[in-house]
Amino acid sequence: MSNATAEPITMQGGTMQVPSHPIIPFIEGDGIGPDIWAASVKVLDAAVKLAYGDDRQLHWQEVLAGQKAFDATGEWLPDATLDAFREYLVGIKGPLTTPVGGGIRSLNVALRQILDLYTCLRPVQYFKGVPSPVKQPELTDMVIFRENSEDIYAGIEFEAGSEDLEKFKQGFSQTFPERWKKVRFPDTVGIGIKPVSQEGTERLVKAAIQYAIDNDHESVTLVHKGNIMKFTEGAFRDWGYQCAKDHFGATEIDGGPWCSIKSPKTGKQITVKDVIADAMLQQILTRPAEYDVIATLNLNGDYISDALAACVGGIGIAPGGNINYDTGHAIFEATHGTAPKYAGQDKVNPGSVILSGEMMLRHLGWTEAADLIITGLNGAIGAKTVTYDFERQMDGATLVKCSEFGEAIIKHMG
Ligand SMILES: NC(=O)C1=CN([C@@H]2O[C@H](COP(=O)(O)OP(=O)(O)OC[C@H]3O[C@@H](n4cnc5c(N)ncnc54)[C@H](OP(=O)(O)O)[C@@H]3O)[C@@H](O)[C@H]2O)C=CC1
Ligand SMILES: O=C(O)CCC(=O)C(=O)O
Ligand SMILES: [Mg+2]
């Protein structure tokens, strides 16, 4: 163990300053969270050690959320946890449970909203050898920019039969009597509100286009259901194109609305296009090579993330990060949830959190350590030492536990 002092990551003049021994807050998570975290932290520490010896080290600081927090403090998301993510800028988390129907609202969504982590960044790539339900999984190579702060995830809902709904109904039906008549069963209805703003759209689309420029991508596709939800999803499309023009000098192709940007880095053209979400969900199976960077709204992004993860071998290796590119705040986390039926069995694939950690290392600029994780993961999959989710679909594979898969990744790093 190094004796160097642990320090916070800071932002100075819009640039992230990463000390050699940064303090990284982590949430273990509910359900399968503790199993996955135990395996993942070993992989992340091993990659850093192998890449930098004693010169660098991640200093983990546990913060509480979910059941563990409630049992210890009576709060599901204690202020101390939010303060730690605010102060230390970059952190990582396991999945947290959200009850369906009633109960607490999503703690995962709350973290994103309170810290204004407006981008949910979810890269989807194929690792050779991973079993997949599609014929050419290697054609799926996309990066999802899911808007994380708006849409129906803002949680403005009125429960059927509640006093609040009665108040909402009164105000709405008096102000907009013709529209209220369109509600089919007004006595038993529950209502949700879907806010989508120009500012919210613009910062997300700007981040997606900048990412395409920085990482030499060919296209950015705005995915929406704007034919039906004209002033939310349709506006997302229009504001997205406007953003491409205003901030990146995009020009229309053949009279629009598709447009093209000349990359200031490579001089290549980047196409900005759009597609309606249902068509996109069939085309990711039939023509995945046509999609590259995806910019979409919150709910679409949630559905698309899991669908694309399935195409490249499943949610067990689907990573993500929730990022505010302006303040530098970021929390990395798997795409999957708490899979409660597997909790405590040391069984599931820790790949999603390990790859979320790999994204975090890359975000910190620790690319050598990040690269070692990819090498290790490819090695473990290549050797067919895999967890149940892969083993059940792979010929001649050796079934290993969650912890053993982490150890196999470490073994194959160097
Ligand atoms: N960001 C977060 O913290 C998220 C939290 N959630 C929450 O998680 C809870 C459970 O949600 P649920 O809908 O069951 O979705 P989950 O993603 O938790 O699980 C669904 C299925 O996905 C597969 N799976 C999930 N994780 C892994 C893994 N690490 N390795 C291998 N397979 C995996 C399993 O499939 P199989 O049965 O085929 O083995 C599992 O049964 C809910 O409360 C939900 O709100 C959900 C998503 C994100
Ligand atoms: O917060 C939750 O429980 C679910 C969130 C989710 O599915 C996601 O962000 O992908
Ligand atoms: Mg989801």
Image (cartoon, grey):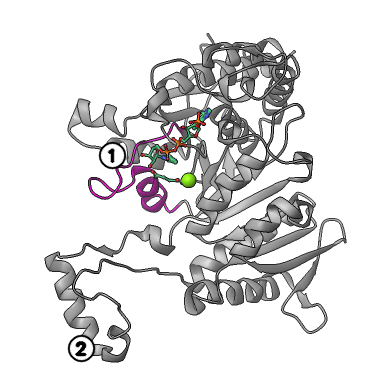
* Residue 138, percent from left and from top: 78, 40
Write the start and end of the magenta stretch as one range.
Answer: 93-116
* Residue 44, percent from left and from top: 58, 21
Residues under labels 1 and 2: Cα distance? 38 Å
In front here: 263 or 189?
189
Give the SS element for disc 1. Answer: loop
* Residue 267, percent from left and from top: 88, 61
Q: Are marks 1 and 2 in contact (CB under 8 Å)?
A: no
Is residue 28 shown in magenta?
A: no
| Above or below, 193 relative to 385 | below
In front here: 352 or 8?
352
Question: Residue 77 — which label?
Answer: 1
Nearest to viewer (mark 1 / mark 2):
2
Residue 53 visible, this orientation: no
Give the SS element for disc 2. Answer: helix
* Residue 349, percent from left and from top: 55, 24
* Crowdedness near tag 2: few (<14), some (14–19) or many (≥20) residues, C-alpha within 10 Å: few
The residue positioned 60% from the left and 73% from the top of the image is 237
Indicate which disc, 1 or 2, sits on the residue closer to the N terminus: 1
Q: Which residue is label 2 attached to?
A: 174
Question: Residue 131 — which label?
Answer: none
